[in-house]
Each structure stands twice: as C-alpha cells, then as structure tokens.
Image (tube, coloured by chain):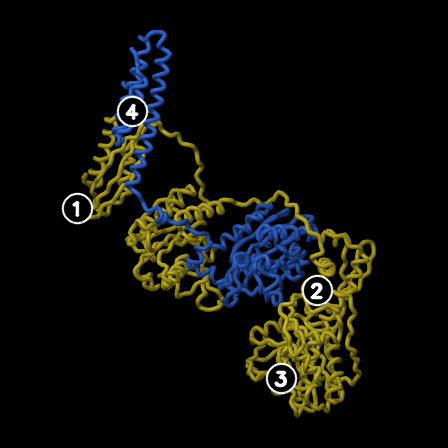
Amino acid sequence: MQWNFQEIHQYAQAEAQSIDSAQALEAFRLKYLGKKGLVADVFASLPTAQAVDKAAIGKGANDLRNFVEKLIAEKLGSLSAVKTAGEKVDVSLPGTGDAIGHTHLLTQTMQEIIAVFEQMGFVTIETPEIETEFHNFTGLNIPIDHPSRDAFDTFYLDAEDPSARGRRLLLRSHTSPGQVRIMKEHQPPMAVIVPGRVYRPDAVDASHSFMFHQVEGLLVDEKVQFSELKGLLTEFCRRFFGPKVIMRFRPHFFPFTEPSAEVDINAEILGIQRKKWLEILGCGMVNPKVFEGVGYPKNKYKGFAFGMGVERMAMLKYGINDIRLFYENDVRFLKQF
Amino acid sequence: MKLSLNWLKDYIDPELSTDELIERLTMAGLEIEAVETVDGDTVLEIEITPNRPDCLNTLGLAREIGAITGKAVKNPIVKNHKTSVLKNFVTIENKKDCSRYLATLIRHVAIKDAPKEIKQHLNSLGINVINNAVDITNFVLMETGQPLHAFDYDKLVGGKIVVRRAREGESLVTLDGIERKLNPSILVIADVEKPVAIAGIMGGKATEITAGTKNILLESAHFEMGIIRRACRSLGLRSDSSYRFERNVNFEGVLTGANRATDLLLELTGGQLSGRAEVAVKSKNRAAKVKVKVADIESLLGVAVTPVKAKAWLARLGFKVTASGGVLTVTPPLRRADIQQDVDVIEEIARMIGFDHLPSKMPTIKAINIAVDKRPREIKDKVRKVLSAAGVDEIITHNMISTKMLVKSNMADLKAIRIYNPLNQDQELMRPSMLPSMLQAAVTNINRGQKDLRFFEIGKRYFLDGEKETVGILLTGRRSQDWRFSKKDTVDIFDLKGIVERIFISIGVSPAYESNSFAVLDPGCATSIKLNGIYLGSLGKVDGKILSNWGIKNQDIYFAGIHLDEIYPLPGMTLKYQSISEFPTITRDVSLAVKKEILYQKIEEICQQQGGDILKSVKFIEQYLGDKIQAGHKGLVFSCQYQSNSRTLREDEVSTVHERILQSLTKDLGAILR
C-alpha cells in the first residue's frame, strides 16, 4: 500500500487547527496515535510492503508520529492558556496559613550563649533555684554579715534548710551555687555551664527585676591560667556580638574568684551612645577557698569561673531599654523575635 | 566613694588629665561611675569593692593613684599627742563588739565656722557643713577613713563613756531628730545613765556640739563590722561612718585619726588638750606574712614575672617583700586586711601589670568527665518545636505570685512555698501552678485588645519536695488568622488536645486521656493525661467562674499543664522501620447513632477487638449533634481500613469481619446504624 505522507501531514494540521476542547484533542490523539490509529496502521502495513518501500514507510511513520505529537503539544498549550484566563484570581491577596510560634527572646539568647560554650566543649547542667546558705554564700567564700553579701541580697523562704537547723532555705541570688554543687559531686577536669533563673529583692524599674536569668561557667583542671579565661571570653564575645567587638578586662572583686575581673564591651559597635563601655559579665580565677570548701585536695586544681546576665546580653544586643518587657509578654513584643 | 580632685592635690599630683586619671583608676579596679562638677571642683564617684575599705578615703585613693602612677604621696604631718591619761574614763562591756576606744578630752573650745578650705572640700563631697568641731570630724573621716564623733562633754552624765549593748526599752533621739527604738542587738555609747550615740552609726541629739559647747569629747574607735551592719539593717539607718565600719576600718587608724583631729581641733577651736583615755585589745597590729612562689605567678596569670619586677610593683603598693629561693615573702600594710593568700598578692601584681596587658589564649578543654542526662533537654527541645509549629508563642512569666492570684484561680487549697521577706504582697508565694501567672499574661494582652492568644511557658512549679518542671499551654480567641475562614471560629478543646497529642507523639509517649474533674477546669470539658497510672498532666476549658474572677469576658480559655518531671524518666520509643504494605487497602465507612454518654474511645476499642489482624486502623471522620437524630443520641462517622501485609484481601473476608464489628457495636453499645 502506498502512503501519501505529505497529504496526511497537511490534513492532520488542518484538523488540529479546528480543535477547541480537550475531548476533541483526545479524539485527535486516538485517531493518529491510538492502538488502532493511523500511525499503527502504517507500521502494520510494513510486513506486506515492497522491500524497496520499507525504509521510506518506516521513516514516514516515525515522522508522522513526531509531527502529530508536536501538534498535540502545541494545542495542549493553547487550550490550557484559554482555560486559566477564564478563572483569573487576585494573586495580590495575602497568602494564608498561621505563623509559627515565637520562642521567647530570653530563651533564644540563653540558647545562643549555651550553644557557643557547648561548641567549645562545655556541658550544660541545671541546678536548683531553691538553695541553701551554704551553696549560695558560705561555699563561695561569702561570709554572713559581710558587706560582700550586699551585692547578693537574697529572698529567704518560709522553710527550714534540712541540712542546717534553724537556717532558712533561700532563692539563689546568682547561678554560682551551681559551681559548689557540681564540684561537690564531680572531680575535675570539668568545663560546665549552669543556666537558670535567679532572684534578688530589687525594686522593679527599667533596669531591675526581682527575677532574672544568668549563665554561669566553670572550668577546673590541674593547669588553668587567667590568660585562658581571657581567651575564652574574648572568643565568646566575638561569636555572640560579632567579630568587631572591642572588649576590656577590668579588675573587680568577687569573694569566690581571685583575681577577679569584669568585662566591658565598647558600646559603639552596638550603636549605643550614652556610654563608652558597657559591663557584660564578671569572671575570675576560682578562689582556692572555694576548692577547699568542696573538699578538693589543697593546691591541686586551678580553675576559672564567669557569670553573665541573660537579660542584659539580650538588651544590649537587641537594643531593648526596659527589662520589664521580657516578663510582660505583650504579643507585640513576643512576635518581634 | 566621692573623690574631689582639688582635695586630692593636697596629697598627690598625678600629672594626668581627668580623662586619663579616670581610665587608669578604672583599669586598676576603681571604676568611675560618675563625674560631676561642684563649684569648679571635679568630683569622681568611684565604686569601691568591699575588699578595699582602705580606699574609702581621700588619702587612701591618693596612695592607690601613687601606686598606679609611681608618683609620691605627701602624707599630712600628724603629731603624736602626749597628755595625761584619763583613768576609769572608758568602759567596754565586750571587747568583741569594740576592740578599741580612744577618747580625747579638749577643753575651752570656741565653736564657730570652719575655715574656708575645709568647708569647700566637704562641700565637694556633698557633706553638710555645720561648725568647726563637727566639720573637723567629717574632714578627718574623709581624709583618713577613720570615723570620729564629737560629744558635748558637759552633757555626758557622770562624765564617762560606757560602750555596751542597748537595753530593752531604751531609745535615743539621733542627730537627725528621729527617735530610735533600741534593743540588745544594737551597740551604743552611753554615759552613766543612758545611750548618747548608736555606736558607729550616729550620735545623739542631746549631746551634739552646739554654739554653746565649751568642752569636747572626741571619740575614735574600732567597732566590729557585723554588729554595725546588723544595727544599720534593723534601724534602717546608715551614715558615712557606718558605711566604713561595715567594711572594716583599720585598727591602726584609730590613733592616727584621733591625732589628726586633735591637731585640727586645737588649732581651729583654740581648745586645750586635757587628757586621753584608751581601752583596746592587744595583738591586733601584726600583719600576716604571705608566701608566694614566683612560679605560681606565671602558672596563674600565664606570664613570667621576675622577682625583681614583682617586688617593685608590690613596693609601690606599700608591701614589704623579701625574695629567696623562688619564694616571695610579702608583708602587706596593716590597712590591706584583704591580702591573705598568695592569689591575693598575685592579683595585685596582675593589677599593676594591667589586666589588658596580660596574654590571652584559648584553653584546652579536655574530654569532660561529667555525664549529663540528655533526655530532659531533648524533650524540651521537642516540646518547643511542636508548640512553635502549632503557632504557640513562648512567654516567660514571674514565678512569684500573690495569694490573691491563687484565690482568683480557685487554687487557695494548694500549699505554696511562702517567701519570708517578699518585696510586696504581689510576690509572696512561689507558684504551685503555671495557670495564675499565665492568666495574668493573657489578661495583660486582652486588656490591650490582643484577644487571639496562643501561649506556652516552660517553667517550674515549686513545692517543699522540689521544683517541678512544667509546660503550661494557654489558647484563646480565633482558631486561625486565615482570612478565608470565619472570624467567629474560635479555638476549642480539640485544638488544645491536638497540640498535646502531637507533643506526646514527638517524645514517643502514648498516654491515655480520661475525662476527669479539676478545681480549675470546666467539669464537662476536662481530661487528665495519664500513662500506666502516672499522672502526666491535664487539659481542658478553664472554669467560667475563674475567668470572671480575672475579668476575662466574652472569650473562653483553654489550658493544659504537662508535668515534664514525670516524663523525663519514661523510656522513649525506639524507632524501627515498619514495612509498608504493597497490597490495597479496603475502606468501609460506618455511620451510627449512640447515646451521648458513650465515648468514641469505646467504639474504637470494640473495632480493635473484633477487627482481627486485617483491621489496620480506625479513622474518626465526624460527630453530629444536631436535631436530625433521636434525643439523647449523637451521630458518629468513622471508617475502618482493612489491609494485609502479605496478600490482597477478598471482599467477602472483609465483609465478614466488618459485619462482626457492626454487630458488636449494636449489641454491646446499643448503636443504631444510620
């Protein structure tokens, strides 16, 4: 049988032009490409064809198939374009779905601080908020009736300390009692951080709260130097505040460290103008009296400790000027971070 | 401590600009907190740490500046007055309270204004100028750090001094005109009859120096720091004197201060020295020697220091040092009672070098030998993740609450730990529940017009047997902010239960939810969360009465409390791959009516019992509570999914099982198929 491929092509093209629906297009496809379609017929004629014609018929069938497929593809494109045009939506309307919940800025800041120290090899341990005088004061070389207690004014509880008759339990005024607890339970080497809530009976104002958060750090080993404390905290500040941070170590006094220092950072990089230097943390080399108090052998260990206020770090980093915003929980504050 | 730069020049010229001086003092540990100008004088407000009472006076600061700058300090010349000893003049009841008391009697004084220079110096420090005698005591206090007091001698009954505890019922009108009730915990200076001063804190009005005073008794003493501190606290009274006694004054300064003041009194009041009495304990004047290994300086600071250098730095601070065999023997001056151990000396060396000049390097952090239980942290992270995905915002509330908040929340029965010294009644209890403080946060927002709230807090509840970590979840207002849905569609218990269920799925625990009654929840809409009898928490609709107590109107609040401490010890699920069946699932929908009190949970249980191993799951579809159903009934629609892991199920075997389920539901629960 002879096939006039040119004529078939022209016919198919004309036919395709008049297609105006998906159904008509499907009928068109079946007519040419279906199991009983024209292309199949052409292939079916091959066995009975003259040997000289076989190559031309084979090529013609393939070409026809490709040609029809092309026509269908084109038609499909123009048909669907017509369809969407009919159901145009106002895509400028806002997308939907509810926002994910916000993690409280203090949690985020705490997690950020913890992450920096954990990346350096510290482990995180939480210790209780309800404490004894021994852990909060005595074990930290803060004697009763000593002016150094002034800095750690304390809430006492209406509950007796089971380990010291006649003495009250208290709410820890800093995270440092965590040092005493951890050293009483474990032997060096150790590198731990103790995050948590602390309490001091301060009247509430823009920069004071009777409850706030601290992160304490402690590293103890046989050989530990002040230069390493400097190195560690410098690296911490770079990671937390950014590589441009400028800091200084200023001598200070804490009963539980000797030497003791406070760390200031330069206010300019945070865009703060009212002061040149901002105090961010206290630190020092663990006082041998603290090691003695937890029962470590004399002169065997050295260590350093540091503590920082989480609220303060967050306030400096994010430009928050009132500490009360953290606990008021106005959603307009919460959803900013 | 205030430092007048004009006054400072009487003892040292630091040859530094004010800015440089501030920088140097700050970097030596004397932080400048404020700078002010008073009548042309520059005054620095310096934070003096409690270990440095020796810096609580102008001369002490001059010495410190001398040590920092290497410049010499000019000490005022003080005569050692020789005079007759007044016998049986001073009695100290207990020398533990007062280790030294020195009384100097000066007669025939003329009380008038002090000279201009003294008045200017005091004015710079904000101290009121009174008269020459009183101004001299204040001047010497601010110069040397020794608190002094001048009595009108003729008003001391019996002309004698007794240092004793106050007696029960005694009182004293102090110089500020206020009557102070005294008690035996307070140390007083008395004449033979009554208290005339509160030791170390403030003198009495009756014996003060007035224009008519003829004879002065000058007190210079050393009181025990603890007793002064406690008295200040109990009286709520502090003074420049007590501030120094609380921080300990130098035992030696008692004499120096008395002599300096005597000099000035004689010169400026025209009085005559008439006699002196002293009572003191012995052996207070030996400075402790501290031994420091030179090698330890390097091992602590990370920088090598030669004995010669160390000696030079310490000498500037007035420390005597001898070096031998790599060990420094250091004798600090008597005023430096803070120097007790080698590390104290090493800190002084570090301060002289400057902390910023010490090297800096990263520490080697060894493999840690503390094993930490990771489960609590993992669980909290997962809880946060689920809650965040559910659009719940984290809040942090005060965990100190008022009794009123507990009562408003119908929790008056809960035993809360009481704070012994609360700031005020709003914060007198440690919360035994998360609900009150979370309701407070909700009210704050609702009052500001923010009514659609999804809050959670991970915090603690406090009991005498410990601190319990807890998650509180609070939902109220619109279910979704999606504009395609109705604004009237508000959250209900299923929104909350869904979140709680997802939390437990994420931590691999499958608890049971049983309706239960709680003091704070609506009894018709509350469930406990339990696992094998362990109570893990509860959830439900907050009782309407509680909401009206809190002033919350026109909106329901749903609340869940999950007790994390109970969950931490539970074994988590170990995840193992379950093969996915390649055979088709056959689904049969069931629609039935049951009595309202029958729980859907019961229906699911029957399906599971009767479903054999081909029932894969039961899926709840909907609940119908309308009037197209017989009274007292509810309509339930659910589907049963049948599937095998090993073959394609035949229609007839599914039908047999499904029929068995339906029969059981009708027979055992009285269900009516619809």
Which amino acid type is marked by label 2?
Answer: Arg
Measure how far apart labels 3 and 4 are at the Cα level.
118 Å
Q: Colour of chain A?
A: blue
Please determine if labels 4 and 2 lie on a single subunit: no
Where residue B461 appears, x then y in whole percent?
44, 56
Q: Chain of mark 2?
A: B
Question: Which three-letter amino acid code belongs to the residue tagged 1?
Answer: Lys
Q: Write down the residue under mark 2.
A: B24
Q: Is residue A111 above or below residue B444?
A: above
* SS class, disc 4: helix
Q: Which chain: yellow? A: B
Q: Is residue B150 left or right of residue B593?
A: right
Chain letter of disc 4?
Answer: A
Residue marked by disc 4 = A29
Q: CA distance from mark 1 to mark 2?
A: 88 Å
**Circle nearer the N terminus (3, 1):** 3
Residue wearing tag 3:
B196
Residue A61, above or below B215: above
Residue found at the very far right of the displayed protein: B324
The C terminus of chain B: image quadrant: top left
* Kind of element beneath mark 1: loop
Q: Which residue is mark 1?
A: B628
